[in-house]
Amino acid sequence: MDTNIKFNTKNLDLFYGDFQALKSINMEIREKEVTAFIGPSGCGKSTFLRCLNRMNDLIDSVKINGEILFDGKDINGPIDVINLRTRVGMVFQKPNPFPMSIYENIAYGPKCQGMKDKNQLDALVKESLTKAALWDEVKDRLNKSALGLSGGQQQRLCIARTIAMNPEVILMDEPTSALDPIATAKIEDLMSSLKKDYTIIIVTHSMQQAGRISDKTAFFLMGEVIEFNETPIIFTNPHDKRTEDYITGRFG
Amino acid sequence: MQAIKRKKQKEKIIEGFFLICAFVAVVSVLAITAFVFYNGLKPFISNSYPLWDFLTGVEWRPGSNLYGIFYMIVGSVYATFGAILIGVPVAILTAVYISEMASSRIGKKIRFAVELLAGIPSVLYGVFGLGIVVPYVLNISPMAQGESLLATILVLAIMILPTVVSISETSISAVPKEYREGSYALGASKIQTIFKVVVPAARSGIMTGVILGIGRAIGETMAVMLVCGNPIAGIPTSLFDQIRPLTTNIALEMGYASGVHQELLYSTGVVLFIFIMIINLAVNKLIKAKVGS
């Protein structure tokens, strides 16, 4: 087996009650690459993303068939979900910092895993905020509420919070759709700098964004992966007519 | 034009009607306040009884012209404090259980039971206290009676449950699901998510429930009267001592009192009133300070 494959899904089906949201997804996601999922609303791309850290567990009516191998191990089996989520972090569409201080937002995850040492936490907070390109903006107000930050800062805080767990993979669910263009540009820069340390999987509505930042792109439609390939190929020479129609703006 | 004008007039009339309705509440609170304060302050203004003796005295013997309520204030505060100490944690955990843990079927049943609890007339709480709690306390008490501070605390703790549970539950349910998702995505367990993120986020709502619970506990009369003992003197020094809260003092004697005795019962009401105001203001400040930080 190729050790560079981080996630490998085999015949993955997902149902919300009777509705089938994902149809037989087979996908290999490689380590330390940026993989983008594009497709029209309701095509299943966010649903698929949320399978990768078992966030769909929170919804009662979800049923999943097939395998999701993470480093070769099926995460739908009897695994430690908490351990999985510390290794596969997630950033959401709407920035969702906790209503506590900036410092506590970063320290929350490590503390939940039992880290208590103040010096260690201080260092981790600084390191995470620095990596998320937020340290200079917030270093003087670490004890102020995170809710006082701008939307873009809040989203970078959420990224910093995820980085603090030192995950292997970062899932991003339309992380810039609630942000203005400048904040979006900052997050995109951040993603390219994070790429060397982390495997990044991003759902995006913006094809330009996928084109700018990703190595691989998957095009989803009605619960199926229509095409999955190198990003330049998807955007310049798609093999499937439907992909071409979507990226040229004929629907979606 | 005519039609528009008439429509406007109609709107005005309806608005006026709403205003009158809103006025009823405002007028009532002002009238009650004025009435209680007017009657309650009379004996001190006319010097028919010294304020200092009233506030610091530890005996209430109308026959001997002794009207001291200090031991009642202490009793009221102890009983309220004790009820909050026991009732609030139970109520918050109940609210957490209903909104975060229980299946919707079981959650509904518990919520229904809590709502029923809110609808039980307070005299029935008192009867329950007298029939069940008081004998139980008597069993474990070194004293010869079961009516006591402890019995009062236990009955009040149950009585504040519905208020604190329902308000806490509402505010816990109102915590955005994004906070929970964010917490789970960081590898937090359910318990960590609930107690480190969800409950703190619902803090101000829960505090509102606690204030209302305090208000209910300190103002409760009927149920307390049946289980507290109503002694005529003595600061309580143990859980098994009897107490005479401010509320029951008024209710027990207002029916037949006259003259200074009656006026001093109003004065007791004034003290009760001030207590509730202080608690409300203090807790309001507390909430604002916390939210601000």
Image (cartoon, rainbow, N blue to C red):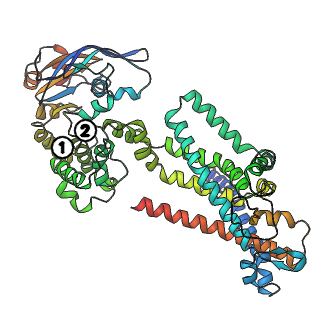
Q: Which amino acid does label 1 sit on?
A: Ile
Chain of residue at mark 1: A
In this rendering, position of residue A63 left or right of residue B152: left
Measuring 19% from the left and 23% from the top, which residue is drawn there? A71
Percent x, y of residue A146: 32, 53
Residue A92, placed above or below residue A51: below
Q: Do the residues labelled 2 and 1 touch (CB within 8 Å)?
A: yes
Chain of residue at mark 2: A
Which image quarter: residue A45? top left
Measuring 44% from the left and 49% from the top, which residue is drawn there? B201
Which image quarter: residue B73? bottom right
In this rendering, position of residue A114 left or right of residue A131: right
- Can residue A88 be seen at all in this image of the molecule? no
Percent x, y of residue B222: 79, 55
Judge by depth and name the residue closer to the eye, B282 or B58: B58
Residue reaching furthest to the bottom: B47
Q: What residue type is labelled 2?
A: Pro
Judge by depth and name the residue closer to the eye, A204 or B47: B47
List the residue tagged with mark 1. Answer: A187
First of labels 2, 1 by sequence position: 2
Measuring 86% from the left and 67% from the top, which residue is drawn there? B253
| Alpha carbons under labels 2 and 1: distance apart | 8 Å
Q: Which mark is residue A175?
A: 2
Residue B49, placed above or below residue B128: below
